[in-house]
Structures are given as structure tokens and as C-alpha cells.
Amino acid sequence: MDTFQIEHLSVTYSDGTESLRDINLAVQANQVTVLFGPAGGGKSTLLRSLNRLNDLDLGVKVSGRVIFHDQDVLAATTDVIALRRKVGIVFARPTPLPLTIYQNISYGLELTGEKRKQQLDQAVEAALRQADLWEEVSDRLNDPANSLSGGQQQRLCIARVLALQPEVILLDEPTSALDPISTAKIESSLKQLKQDYTIILAPHNTQQAARAADFAAFFLQGELIEYGPGKEIFTHPKDKRTLEYIEGRYG
């Protein structure tokens, strides 16, 4: 079953840079789909297209269709706020709110109208457990979020997304600023999370891409070069350019 059906998606920025060119891609539900390739290939632009964050860049031109629940995400009638609740995103650098650990998770729920303390408590604990952080912070929920380590802050950001019960989690180089132990914890969490969520990951290196991918898409200069099951892409790629990148000959 497909979560997203991307059809002829092209994105051009206001300076004329063509970031994506005629992308066609079906994203499988409850799988980790990895977008990999050299910097500037369009991976982040694709992630930002899926929940309309590209709207924040003035002058960007987007064409094609992104189908989610039988609706075109790119249509003018799309409720963007509702879309971003269903399709959450985590960025490369941890961005905790200047609040307590607890409030970082509860804040989004309170904005949606949830005020019941018991419900908020349950949601905060559930999200922190899913992000593999509860055991480390359960006795310090009222501490400032910025008192956490970098790896803990990134897992807090993942928990913040999970608290809103999305269907899809987008991750843009989520471990690029983290140490190997924190990276391993997040990668382990992703394997568990895909049971309940569709995950689209743009990792910061090929090794992580190969470890995490159920499906993999190789991007080069705005084009989708190759897409398929991760094991096939990373062991027997069909396109010479994919092979050369995996082998480290460029990028």
C-alpha cells in the first residue's frame, strides 16, 4: 500500500535553480524509505514538498502532484496545518522549544485544544517511550529541554512529532550532529516506529542509508536515478551512477 504517490513533481526556486525534475515515486506505508545521494540532489526539497514547507520559500514554483489519502497535497484547497500534523518533520539539528522537557511534548497538543492533565501526561509518556527517551528523563520532566544532551534533544524532537500522532515522519539528516551512540539509538527507534508510521529518511551518509533502508531512492542533481528495495539498491544497483556513488567515487 502506498502512503504517497508522487507524480511528475518538479520544484524550481526563485533564483531559477531547479531542485527537482519530474520525480515519480510511490512511498510504501510502514516502511523506511531512504532518500540518498550527493548534496544538492533535491532530497530535502522532496521532504519539504510532502508537507508543504516549500510554501515558506517565496517564489518557489512547484508542479506535478503529491497524492496522500486520495488528495493532492499541492492543491490550493489543502488544509496545510492539518497536513503538517499528519506529516511531521524532524530536522538535522535538534530544535527544542525554550520550555521544559514536558512542555516540549505537551505544547502541540495544547494548541490543538487538549487541556486535560491526565491525557497530556499519558501522551507525553507515550511519545517519550516511543522515542526511547522516557527512561532517561522520566524523573526530570520539569527541567529545561536545553539541559539535555544533543542526542537526547533530537529524540525529544522526534517525541514532539509523535505526540501529535502523525501518519508519516520525515527526517532530514536527523543524526548528522550526533555521536555514534545517539545515532544508534535513533536508528533503533526507527525500526520500531515503522510498525505504526511511514518513515521517509534523508540520512547524512551512505552507511546509514544502507542500514536503515527498506526502500531506497538515489537522487542526483534533482533527478531520481533509481528506486527499489534497499538490499537490491545497495548490493546490486542497476544504474552505473548509483554504483559509483555507493562505492565512494564521487559525492
Image (cartoon, rainbow, N blue to C red):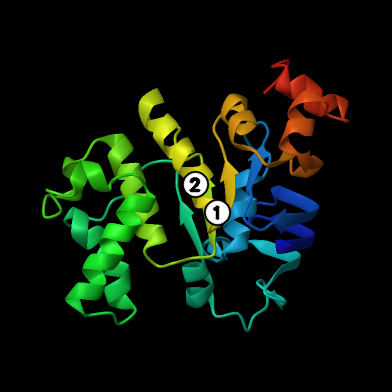
Front-lying residue, 128 or 222: 128
Residue beneath disc 2 = 192
Question: Residue at coordinates 64% horizontally, 30% vertically from top-left?
Answer: 210
Residue 227 image position (x, y, % from top left): 79, 42
Q: Residues within 10 Å of mark 1 (few under 14, many from 20)?
A: few
Locate the N terminus and report the quarter of the image it occupies. bottom right
Q: Position of residue 80 (x, y in %)?
A: 53, 75
Residue contact between numbered discs 1 and 2, judged by CB atoms under 8 Å? yes
Q: How many marks?
A: 2
Image quadrant where one finds the C terminus:
top right
What amino acid type is highlighted by mark number 2? Gln
Tag 1, which secondary structure? Answer: loop
Between 103 and 53, the one nearer to me in the picture: 103
Q: Residue at x 60, y 53 (%)?
A: 47
Residue 8 vs 20, above or below: the answer is: below
Can the viewer see residue 232 in this picture? yes
Residue at label 1?
A: 195
Placement of 45 over or under 178, stated as above or below: below
Measuring from the top left, give residue 174's x and y in whole percent: 46, 40
Gap between marks 1 and 2, in whole Å?
A: 6 Å
Left/right placement of residue 76 relative to residue 138 reads: right
Q: Nearer the viewer, residue 143 or 49?
A: 143
Q: Quadrant of residue 61?
A: bottom right
Numbered badge on residue 2:
none
Q: Kindly tell me whether residue 177 is visible in this rendering.
A: no
Name the residue: 57% across, 56% down.
48
